[in-house]
Image (cartoon, rainbow, N blue to C red):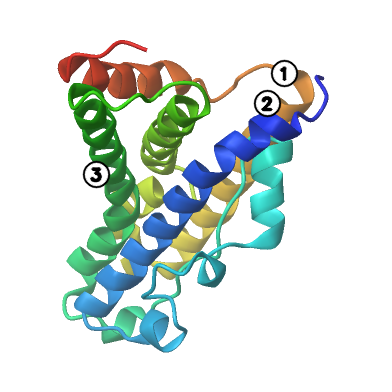
Amino acid sequence: MSGFDLIHSLKLLPGIVIGLTIHEFSHAWMAKRCGDTTSHDQGRVTLNPLKHIDPLGFIMLFIAGFGWAKPVQFNESNLKNPGVDVIKIAVAGPFSNALTAMFLSLTYAALLDWGVNINGIWAELFIYAIFINWGLFVFNLIPLPPLDGSHILFSWFRKYPVIYQTIYRYGTLLLFGLLILTFTTGRNLLPIWPLIELIGGGFLRFLGYNI
């Protein structure tokens, strides 16, 4: 295992903070829009990173390559249309990351088109932030609990609490088992990078830029 690279980690920091903050804010904003004020009352409908960052999950992102933010809580009984609203809340997070990645890509391309000299560390910060947000989009759509994709795939089972809780329990164990094995063995058991590269690099190429 290679040693911890502080300089590399600092370059990742802005993209991680932006990605996690927007992701959790979007969950909270959508929950409020759907009729539940739990996250609003907890101060989560904000772009203040300190309200969303989980210290341990944040550190794990740098050490192990995977981590987490504070989960957004909501009361399903307060939602206007629970069956649909749960899915809306789930997709709001990853799709906000996709929109953020596209916005950053467009900004990067526009600055280059306007002749702004973006190179060195500034170019790296942009590229890292773009791909981190695409990564959050793809990773969170994996249909394994507790990721957002599981709420989309298994939402129908929420009518049956025992079945849903069983799926959630064992799905979560499976996900963390795969992540731990990936970290300890060096084998990527969740090979999502090719898809991230395809989407992120493809969008930049669509804008006329290769990386």
Q: Is residue 190 above or below residue 24?
A: above
Residue behind mark 2: 182
Residue 44 in sight in this render? yes
**Image position, residue 189 (x, y; %):** 59, 22
**Gap in angstroms between the C-alphas marked 1 and 3:** 31 Å
The reply to whether dot 1 and dot 3 touch (C-beta < 8 Å) is no
Q: Amino acid at mark 1?
A: Gly
- The vertical placement of 6 against 156, above or below, is above
Task: Give the side of residue 5 with respect to residue 41, left or right.
Answer: right
What separation in Å lies between label 2 and label 1 (alpha carbons)?
5 Å
Q: Is residue 16 left or right of residue 156?
A: right
Q: How far is the residue under mark 3 from the one under mark 2?
A: 28 Å
At horizontal 44% and vertical 59% (from top left) the residue drawn is: 21
Dot label at residue 186:
1
The residue beneath circle 3 is 99
- Is 166 placed above or below 60 here? below
Q: Residue pushed farthest top?
A: 210
Mark 2–mark 1 CB contact (< 8 Å): yes
Q: Point out the tag, 1 or 3, that comes first from the N-terminus.
A: 3
Disc 2 residue type (three-letter):
Thr
Spot occupied by residue 117 in the image (x, y as percentages of width and height): 35, 24
Q: Residues within 10 Å of mark 1 (few under 14, many from 20)?
A: few
How many neighbours does mark 2 have within 10 angstroms: few (below 14), some (14-19), or many (20 or more)? Answer: some
Q: Secondary structure at mark 3?
A: helix
